[in-house]
Image (spheres, rainbow, N blue to C red):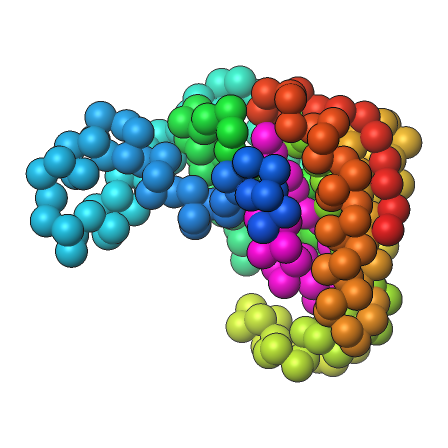
Amino acid sequence: MVIEFIGAPGAGKTTLIPTVANICRTRGICARTVVDAARPSAQRTWAGQAVARLAPQTWRRPLLWQVFYHLSAWSRFAFCARHPRLIGSVLTTQLRRPVPAETRRHAWHWFIHLTGYYQFLLAHARDDEALILDEGFIHRVVQMYASHQETPDIDRVAAYVDLIPRPDLVIAVHAPWEECLDRIYQRGLWERFQRYSPDEVAAFVRNAHSVVNLTIDYIRGAGWTLLEVDNGSDDPVLAQQRLRAGLEALLPALTPHPIGAGVYRNLAV
């Protein structure tokens, strides 16, 4: 099972991941993020098995991470071979963006890394496991189609979404953009944004919020399995309770399906 998050920066995606993992475990599903799944998946390869048998205990974790890192790099080629239109579309779109080259490189760099992680982890996943992506394909719309210089464009978003692998479940985390902006400054502005003015940072967050909402509206209309969670409150427990209620309603329908199958329901909490 693949579970992806989407939300504007500062909406609170990362803080809700433990709740998802815990609820999945109560259903007998081993739910992991990329970092958590990397070493167990690597250990299922011939190289990982050799590390587990031969390496001293203190070396196993770093060596298994290297196995994951290098084999996932090779997995990018398999993903590109399976999704040539997606790769071509992303590359073309990024080259045409009216943003600094550094911004385009940043978006492309993390997108292409994601393809390898995704391909490798799914290739070595078991039926009772779930992969949780807080920065998955659907959330890449923020990096690739939002900036303080660009007007959100539903046509560009839709063209991208139509080509990406569809997850079994998308969890959309909502919060007002002003609240998101406050949270970003409270936790610390990203290093690459340090040179931007407060007005430019605010414009980015507004546009990211718009791109996320356009994407959510589009996948809702396309029948994707979607769970929407309001995280606009100062009390994170409320969002966790809403998420728990929604997941407990959806998981029985999702768990019998193999990775990538998808079930078409929508729930807002």
Q: Is residue 225 visible?
A: yes
Q: Report the front residue among 197 and 232.
A: 232
From the viewer's perspective, tell me whether residue 181 is left or right of residue 58. right
Vertical relation: 192 (above or below) 98: below
Determine the residue positioned at 68% across, 47% down: 5
Left or right of 98: which side holds 258? left
Q: Quadrant of residue 41?
A: top left
Figure check: 86 above or below 180: above
Decide which of 20, 90 is in the foreground and name it: 20
Highlighted range, magenta: 1-21
Q: Position of residue 185 (x, y in %)?
A: 67, 79
- Quadrant (top left/top right/bottom left/bottom right) for the N terminus: top right
Q: Which residue lies at the image location 86% right of the left edge and 51% below the top edge?
A: 269
Residue 220 colored magenta? no
Q: Position of residue 235 (x, y in %)?
A: 77, 73
Q: Residue at x 51, y 29 (%)?
A: 128
Residue 126: horizontal and vertical position, in percent? 46, 26
Q: Nearer the viewer, residue 152 or 262?
A: 262
Let me know if residue 137 appears in the view. Answer: no
Horizontally, residue 230 falls left or right of residue 261, namely right
| In magenta segment, residue 17 | yes
- Residue 58, placed above or below residue 224: below
Q: Quadrant of residue 198?
A: bottom right
